[in-house]
Image (cartoon, helix red, strand yellow):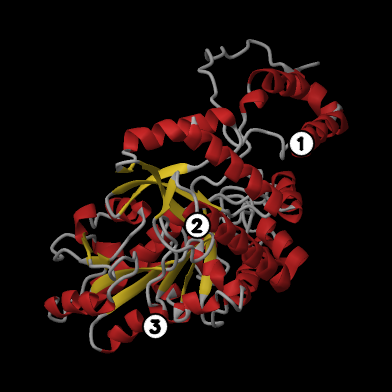
Amino acid sequence: MHTPLAQDAAQMDAVLAETLAEAARFLAQIEARPAGVCAPRLEAAQLPEEGLGALGSLEEFKARFAPWLSGSAGPRYYGLVTGGVTPAALAGDWLVSVYDQNTVGSDESIAPQIELETIGLLRQLFGLPDEFSGAFVTGATMANFVGLALGRQWAGHQLGVDCAAQGLWGLEPLRVFSACPHSSVYKALAMLGMGREALTLTPCLPGREAADVGRLEEHLKRQEGRPCVVVANAGTVNTVDFDDLRAAAALRARYPFWLHVDAAFGGFAACSPRYAPLVEGLEAADSITIDAHKFLNVPYDAAMQFTRRTDLQAEVFQNAAAYLDAQVRADQYIHLTPENSRRLRALPSWFTLTAYGKQGYAEMVERLCALAQWLGAQIEGAREFHLLAPVRLNGVCFALADGAGCVPMEGVRRYLRGLQADGGVYLTPTVYAGVPAVRASLTNWRITQKDVEQAWEAMLRGAQR
């Protein structure tokens, strides 16, 4: 039968060649592509009775959707905390789909060993001790989910309850303390059955997003020996502020708590001797979140969770079936993470780590942080803006200024819509210390001084409209 599928199988080389041509075209234009686009609402297509074939689908995609893709992979997209894709990571990611390995931990393939080795390379990059195990998950949300699940299991054991086996019935609510948690922490607590209301916000240091460890201790005292969870931050989203991890960990000598560190992108400070002091004490954590599709610059979706307590991880996530190996090892990921099946997500990270090494990532982090410092200095000297916090790493937080003070959120959103339509830079809104604000995060490996200057010109154009 001459079906579209049979035809594609016979012309696979042509399918790959045309796909490569489209990828090369996109990458060749990435610096000129608008950082943000205002895409139209297209009428949804109907499923064809007979398929178009791979080449026909590619042409349909290029005609309908490709013109409206943003430059989020490019050097002037500073929204959220978004990295790009290094050339080596791109090569690895393409091969992930070609090889189509299910990294669950069976002995049918070397894929689990590749992930285990990649985790080892990342441990070296972040300076973590060898006793930390780790695994890849989809993003920081699921890494926080895993870390908090381990904290829940640990706290349950302190109270004589195996939460993974018995659930939370009859267990008193477990308290979670954090000074400036990411929104994904609330989501993880909701999914874990602990509830968003389990989280108590502790005071920050004056004018900071970093925890006041002394005030944190007051909350721990009021626990009267009951186990709890502390979520410390290594790089807040708004101002990239860092908790004193060493001081927080030292409190465990007096109070029983699980220390989870959300270091989604701030953990990469460890790559640079200049910025490594910001994450001193990271190795004292019980569990750690670090995101790969930020500073590591690998494709979505990829993040890592680290912990010393693989035993607790297996209690929570072990999967029992007659066709599965029940043994739990560091590379048996089906027993250690939420997913029972997944792609070889670690391979792009393996490629980029081996391609560029420690020095390559130290250079990248230091260059991007220096460019963020330059942008912060321009903002601080401009009458159109107010710099709201020091530039500590790669993020810049600022407000729009008018004669009466700071522009309200409606004005901020209008400004950002104008930037999106202009295409010269893409930024995202926030609120800092009650002030409607804008964030810029410089995380893409492609960013140069020229790119930041072009972005600054677009920011000024938008403010002067």
Q: Observer-nearest residue: 74 or 460?
A: 460
The structure residue drawn at horizontal position 24% and vertical position 81%, both measured from the top left corner, is: 256
Mark closer to the observer (3, 2): 2
N-term mark: 1 or 2: 1
Give residue 23's mark. Answer: 1
Residue 104 seen in this snapshot: no
Of callouts 3 and 1, the N-terminal one = 1
Q: Look at 76% across and 55% down and name the residue there.
A: 88
Residue 63 image offset from top left, x and y in percent: 69, 18
Which corner quadrant of the image does residue 197 belong to? bottom left
Q: Residue at x 60, y 32 (%)?
A: 423
Q: Which disc number belongs to residue 304? A: none
Q: Decide: few, some or many residues near mark 3? Use Cα within 10 Å; few <14, some 14-19, many ≥20.
A: some
- Residue identified by numbered label 2: 395
SS for callout 1: helix
Type of amino acid at the residue the image marks with label 1: Ala
Which quadrant: the N terminus? top right
Residue 185 in sight: yes
Mark 3 or 2 closer to N-term? 3
> Height in image: 174 above or below 395?
below
**Circle 3 SS class:** helix
- The CA span between labels 3 and 2 is 23 Å
From the image, tell me which residue sits under label 3.
246
Coordinates of residue 50 in the picture (x, y in percent): 68, 12
C-beta proximity under 8 Å, tags 3 and 1: no
SS of the residue at dot 2? strand
Amino acid type, label 3: Arg
Local crowd size for mark 1, using a 10 Å CA cut-off: few (<14), some (14–19), many (≥20): few
Residue 154 figure quarter:
bottom left
Q: CA distance from mark 3 to mark 1?
A: 45 Å
Residue type at tag 2: Gly
